Image (cartoon, grey):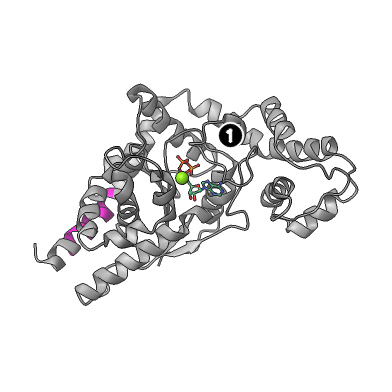
Amino acid sequence: DAVIFSMIQPTGDFHLGNYLGANRVWKQLQDHKVPQQTCLFGVADLHAITVPKLDVVKFKQLRLQAIASILALGISPEKCTIFMQSKIPEHSQLNWLLETITSMGYLNRMTQWKSKSEGVDEDQVKLGLFAYPVLQAADILLYGSTHVPVGEDQTQHLELTRNIARRFNKMYKGRYLVEPQTIFTPTKKVLSLNNPTKKMSKSDADPLSRIYLTDAPESIQKKIKKCLTDSISDNFYYDPENRPGVSNLINIVSGIQGKSVEEVEKDIAHMKDYNTLKTYVSDIIIEDLTPVRIRYEQLIKDPAYLMDVATKGSLEKARPIAQGTIKRLMETMGF
Ligand code: ATP
Ligand code: MG
């Protein structure tokens, strides 16, 4: 049986990178439901507290916004399990069990850890930031997940997850934990609009670096207009090495339209200036995101409903699976 599992952090409104790298696939997988398929999509709120400073009121709101965004994308609480990580204590419990078999050396090689801790004083950098990939492995392994749709930045963490599962199974001589497969989209890495050497991120300080799923059309136009490109303005083609800005736009269009990069190149071959290209790109984004934004604006007005969806999905659907896993593993380990 296929168990499709993925989560997103409530660290800000969802952007085009989240959407094209992960969230849109959640919806596609939900709709191409094969028999015996379970889909679990969650808000990773325990992960969100690894950042230095959180405003409590804002954090509560961001958690609701994440649920509203998931629903606005067309993820259905009937077809899928929509859950809030912190409502299921078994995530933290499995995290501990797995931390006892994970090596510091392996965690030290995680590129996300390296980049996030670089230059930060050792007394300031937190254990949670170092160890969060283990919690992520626990999240995934708790449900026997077989397929995990994520962006490219999660490659290493998924490898770690498989490594931990293998290690546990070897230690206790059995197939207790499932090694999950990573699912990537062709747009597994959407780049920042104003610095195309970095990925688009919720945590980037500059909001002009990303397009939110909830952005108004004018805002999308403005951000695309301002995005960093190059000075070759009469010939647009895909060359991520030398022309990362244009290539990112081509990639975004190809992701939204489900066309290959070559097809998009053909579609824009006649264009002679950046103004034309950028108008074309923003129109395509606006058309695709408008229904999502309209649904989101409705949903966010009803926080009680949003919390109810998250609570039901967590306690009635996700938690019983998680409890079963913990019980089996604890017994296996001799508790
Ligand atoms: P943060 O900056 O707080 O880490 P984020 O934008 O990286 O936020 P996450 O909640 O960490 O978002 O990730 C949610 C999902 O979106 C993950 O599957 C991640 O791989 C994917 N993702 C994030 N950014 C991109 C991107 N630029 N391109 C493709 N996929 C992405
Ligand atoms: Mg991230």
Is residue 211 at all visible to an observer of this figure? no
Q: Nearer the viewer, residue 27 or 236?
A: 236
Taking the magenta stretch, the answer to whether it contains residue 126 is no
Q: Is residue 170 above or below residue 110?
A: below
What residue is shown at x 42% (from left), y 41% (from top)? Answer: 9
Q: Nearer the viewer, residue 148 or 302?
A: 148
Q: Which residue is mark 1?
A: 212
> Local crowd at mark 1 within 10 Å, few (<14), some, or many (≥20)?
many
Q: Position of residue 93 (x, y in %)?
A: 20, 51
Q: Would you identify the image quadrant in which residue 146 lies?
A: bottom left
Question: Could you tell me which quadrant the N terminus lies in?
Answer: bottom left
Q: Is residue 334 above or below residue 54?
A: below
Question: Could you tell me which quadrant the C terminus lies in?
Answer: bottom left
Taking the magenta stretch, the answer to whether it contains residue 327 is yes
Q: Is mark 1 within 8 Å of ligand 1?
A: no
What residue is shown at x 84% (from left), y 51% (from top)? Answer: 267
